[in-house]
Image (cartoon, rainbow, N blue to C red):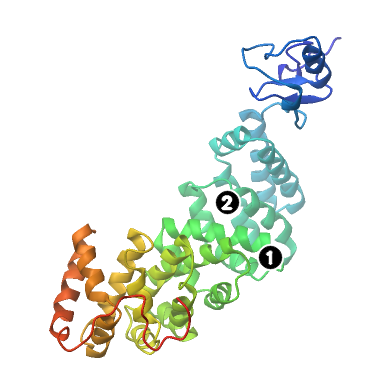
Amino acid sequence: MELEIPRHFICPIALDLMKDPVTISSGTTYDRESIEKWLEDGNFTCPIGVWRIGAMALKRIPTPRIPVSSAEVSEVLFSVTDSKRRLDRCDCLVSVHKIKKWGLESERNRRCIVANDAAGVLAAAFDAFASHSLEKNANVLEEILYVMNWMFPLAREAQLFLGSKPSLRCMVWFLKSNDVSVKQNSINIMKELISCYQLYGEHLAAIDGVNGILFKFIKDPISPSITKASLMVIYHMVSSPNEKTKAEFVEMGLVSLLLESIIESEKSYCERALGVIDKLCETKRGREFAYDNSLAMPVLVKKILRVSELATEYSVSAIWKLSKCEEKVLMEALQVGAFQKLLLLIQVGCSGETKEKATELLKLLNPYRPGLECIDSLDFKNIKRSF
């Protein structure tokens, strides 16, 4: 019986199996020997098109693979479900490795896998194995998180399983891993979960030690992506009504740490950090830490209209919270150019809520203007560090 060669492996010129596949600028794949002979014969255009090509345009590519089918994905996901039921981590790991391999091959494979509700099945398996021995099941749990990092946004079913207390405890445990990629995959899932549903932030905050781990990721950065993801997780945690969480981060010194870190930070980090500062300034203790930090007002004023609309909103909101009934703060704000900045902000336009706060701040600042010299916001009085 003669075997039929899949069309994905056939060279358009030789109409035979490609032994050494190469691609040209048009994106078409040929066998190297066939396309080189085509060019040597004096042809300068693509054999199946009108694109002009040259020998230097040939690029070696991996051997083409047949895209995964829905039936294959369903079969493997059934195996994952069966392994989960039996708590057979070895069989489950074999299935997860197949999904991982398919996902690495092409974006099309990833779309097919996600379309077959792989996220929900894998999340259910993660919850099941996380509910038992973390040490024994660590390998399969790590691999599940790895493949789920390219399945965002997560379906509601997947969120429910990953947001369970055993699953969250497992992810926090992974944040202590020596493997940076494991930390990254875990914090990414946590960020995705907590940004979808606030309750997961409250569940996360209830896990011992998580605040300290997240704080350390900011204080001693491992990678920019982990730091930014940690800031997003913290932001959603301190956005909840739980005052205890805010208090813990404040007492750790997060306000001062963020004020120092955003002086010359890039846009996305600055936005996240200002958002956290704004939330922490909702508490009395958070405002006290900001009052005592000589960087607070100069940095917050400087970030208005300097970074982005979102950063401006957070900065104005934080200044507004700090300036309520605090004459000393109002005077300092004037000295670093807050009045001019706020006036300009209203003129150029901003959101309704920010405009209300800016207008109220201008009214609070106005009585102190005659007795104080308003200087440019780049002139930071008594600040030794370069801005």
* Residue 280 in view (yes/no): no
Query: Height in image: 308 above or below 74?
Result: below
| Structural crowding at the residue carrying mark 1, measured as other residues with C-alpha within 10 Å and reported as few (<14), some (14–19) or many (≥20) | some
Query: Height in image: 358 above or below 156?
Result: below
Residue ID at (53%, 76%): 215
Of helix, strand and loop, which one carries label 1? helix
Amino acid type shown at disc 1: Leu
* Residue 127 in view (yes/no): yes
- Find residue 213 and report its image quarter: bottom right
Q: Nearer the viewer, residue 244 or 378?
A: 378
Query: Height in image: 325 above or below 193?
Result: below
Residue ID at (61%, 29%): 70
Of helix, strand and loop, which one carries label 2? helix
Q: Which residue is mark 2?
A: 123
Q: Nearer the viewer, residue 381 or 240?
A: 381
> Which disc number belongs to residue 134?
1
- In the image, residue 140 lies at what x, y percent? 71, 55
- In the image, residue 291 lies at what x, y percent? 34, 87
Amino acid type shown at disc 2: Ala
Q: Are marks 1 and 2 in contact (CB under 8 Å)?
A: no
- In the image, residue 142 lies at what x, y percent? 68, 57
Quadrant where the N terminus lies? top right
